[in-house]
Image: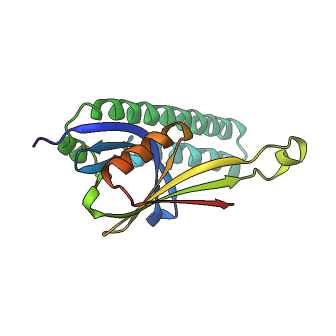
Amino acid sequence: MVEEIVDFFDAYFLVLEEGGVRRSCTLFFTSSRLIVMVPEGINPWIGGVAAIAFVVSFVGLLLRDVTLFLTGFSAVFVAVIFLVLVDANIRNRRRKRVKQFPPDEILKAGKRNLEIPYSDIIKVRHEVVETVETGVSRIFLPTPPSERHTIELETQKGRHAFLIEISELARFIDLMNRFVPEKIEEKKSED
């Protein structure tokens, strides 16, 4: 039997090993496993361009040379904006291109991509966390509490957590019920 992709959608992958860092990802549901594709952007070492411009700006500040400082500062600003835009563009292109690959090729498309076989899933936790914005903006404009939907997959090899948009939540729960029935538990907590 040939493995095929049943459905896919975008989410955020919470990297628990890195303190819950959010990474944009695409979840591919196949007939036998869940594939998590984390698109890779440009090489982080290219950020050295911005670091060099920052050093030039700092040297200009130490030498009290306004021209050197402003040149370095504007170069940092332009380099950072340019790198962020190029990185986002590359990630989006890779995400669109990979959606047309077969499942095994999706796994090979990036070093952060991973598979979660349905047979390895022990439990699926759906948690709704209500958050209330705090800080200065809360004083001037009261905001209603917002909900965040976290899906945690407990497997034999570890835990994987995802942030799901509310519009995609029902479809995710339906797919999980289809492939791993009776393993979903609901939990509601407040932040």
What colour scheme does the image use?
rainbow
Q: Residue furthest left?
A: 1
Q: Is 149 situated left or right of 33 in this image?
A: right
Q: Quadrant of the N terminus?
A: top left
Q: Nearer the viewer, residue 141 or 31?
A: 31
Q: Position of residue 140 (x, y in %)?
A: 90, 42
Q: Position of residue 89 (x, y in %)?
A: 43, 30
Q: Is 119 situated left or right of 145 in this image?
A: left
Q: Residue at x 68, y 53 (%)?
A: 130
Q: Quadrant of the C terminus?
A: bottom right
Q: Position of residue 126 (x, y in %)?
A: 51, 56
Q: Residue at x 63, y 55 (%)?
A: 129
* Residue 128, quarter of picture: bottom right
Q: Residue at x 68, y 35 (%)?
A: 67
Q: Is residue 167 above or below residue 151?
A: above
Q: Is 89 situated left or right of 119 in this image?
A: right
Q: Residue at x 86, y 40 (%)?
A: 141
